[in-house]
Image (cartoon, rainbow, N blue to C red):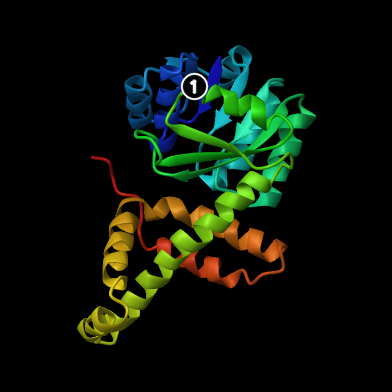
Amino acid sequence: MIGLLHPGDMGSAVGARLREAGHEVSWASEGRSAATRARAEAAGLTDAGTLAGLAGSSDVLLSVCPPDAALDLAWSVAATEFDGVYVDANAVAPDTARRIAETVTAAGATAVDGGIVGSPPVEPDTTRLYLSGPAAADVATLFAGTVVEAAIVDERIGSASAVKMTYAAWTKGSAALLLAIDGVAEREGVGDVLRQEWARSLPDLASRLDRATSSAERKGWRWVGEMQEIAVGFGAAGAPSGFHGAAATVYRRYPRQDPA
């Protein structure tokens, strides 16, 4: 039995792919929203009710949640004395991944570090799940035959998170920089002139800005915590953390939209 925490856009799609591979996948509805329930039901997930019920019935728990909630979720799972395999597949800094691993292993679980690159898995060659840790190969086998490409990095907790962190540092970090540049140009009244110059000397930037704007309007609020984790990771590595601290500030300007 695989337990999924929690069925957001990415998590529910991953859960659906695991079900298609023949695995039974459950989730816990306690405290979750109607939108989460709808995603879980659409993915065919079984409701275990509570976190304790989910942990007690699962051999593997897969955590896919906002990065700023990942450590607290690990503490909640540890409180259930879960002793299976805990896969943290969240966009956290390597040091945060190691703290999560220490938290769940102290309670008896086996920790696997994960990082998801790409879109929610629907079609082949769109989603990679990077895995690291001594039990990474066991988790990778769960995705055999699915469109999720499970790639083992090494046996060190934190390595998979480092791949995700450094990848997103460019994709989402550079998008935030473009959004900030556009905002300053508009405020100074030179937005049109800047775009004309881009068209002549950097012709791909206008389309990249359009994509960055569209993505930020839909889900920029989700990336605030991720940018903060990247800032922590860069600082721990002796690199400037200000780039992604500023990116978090940019994405705060895109609040979560009311689903209604």
Amino acid type, residue under disc 1 in the picture: Ala
Q: Give the labeled residue for mark 1.
A: 28
Task: Provide residue 46's location: percent of width, then percent of height.
Answer: 44, 14
Q: Nearer the viewer, residue 78 or 185?
A: 185
Residue 229: quarter of image? bottom right
Q: Quadrant of the C terminus?
A: top left
Residue 133: quarter of image? top right
The residue at 41%/18% (across/down) is: 20
Q: Residue 11 vs residue 75: left or right?
A: left
Q: Residue 185 vs residue 66: left or right?
A: left
Determine whether the residue tagged by mark 1 lies in a helix, strand or loop.
Answer: loop
Task: Please say if 179 is above or below 188.
Answer: above
The residue at 37%/25% (across/down) is: 37
Question: What residue occupies the far right of the structure in this picture?
Answer: 106
Instruction: Tell me how many marks there are.
Output: 1
Task: Provide residue 228's location: percent of width, then percent of height.
Answer: 56, 59
Q: Residue 242 vs residue 23: left or right?
A: right
